[in-house]
Image (cartoon, grey):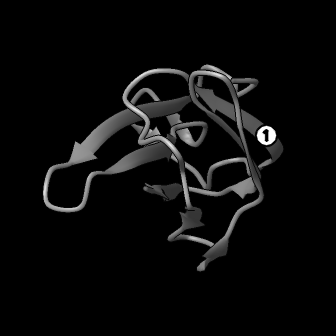
Amino acid sequence: TDLPPQVEVTVHTQPSSGATLVHFVNGSGHQDRSYFEPAPFLERTVTLHRGVPTPVRRVWSAALDRELPFEQTGDGVRFSLPSIELLDLVVLQP
């Protein structure tokens, strides 16, 4: 990914649907015990290689409430996030 280190990314599989859930937390507004509005990160690319359902049928952003463009790679999937504010959940559906 080309995300800065202030963005925490965790990946889980949802057993009931087989979907891959990718959580993004933008911690850029956190400094010691102070909290400020996080800096938005624009146009970032994420590539997942393991734990991805194949083929991926749909990539959806909960924060943006819309589908994201994606590209199936040989062993995973690549998608672009137009922006990351504070939080996002991206769902990769098989």
Residue that carries the numbered disc 1 in the rendered image? 44
- Residue 31 placed where, x, y %? 51, 30
Which residue appears farthest toward the bottom when viewing the image? Answer: 65
Residue 76 drawn above or below residue 22: above
Report the residue at 51% width, 58% height from top.
88
Q: Is residue 51 left or right of residue 71?
A: left
Query: As rendered, which of 7 and 94 lies closer to the eye?
Result: 94
Q: How many marks?
A: 1
In x, y percent, where is residue 14? 22, 52
Name the one closer to the observer, 86 or 92: 92
Outermost right residue:
43
| Residue type marked 1 | Arg
Percent position of residue 91, x then y = 45, 58
Q: Residue at x 37, y 29 (%)?
A: 51
**Residue at the left extreme?**
16
Determine whether 84 is above or below 27 in the image: below
Q: Is residue 62 above or below residue 14?
A: below
Residue drawn where x is 55% and y is 70% of the image: 63
Q: Position of residue 3 (x, y in %)?
A: 70, 28
Q: Name the residue: 57% across, 29% down.
A: 76
Secondary structure of residue under mark 1:
strand
Horizontal side, residue 68 vs residue 30: left or right? right
Quadrant of the image for the N terminus? Answer: top right
Q: Quadrant of the C terminus?
A: bottom left
Closer to the camera in the image, 47 or 37: 47
Left or right? Give the position of 18 relative to 94.
left
CA neighbours of label 1 inside 10 A, class few (<14), some (14 to 19), many (20+): some
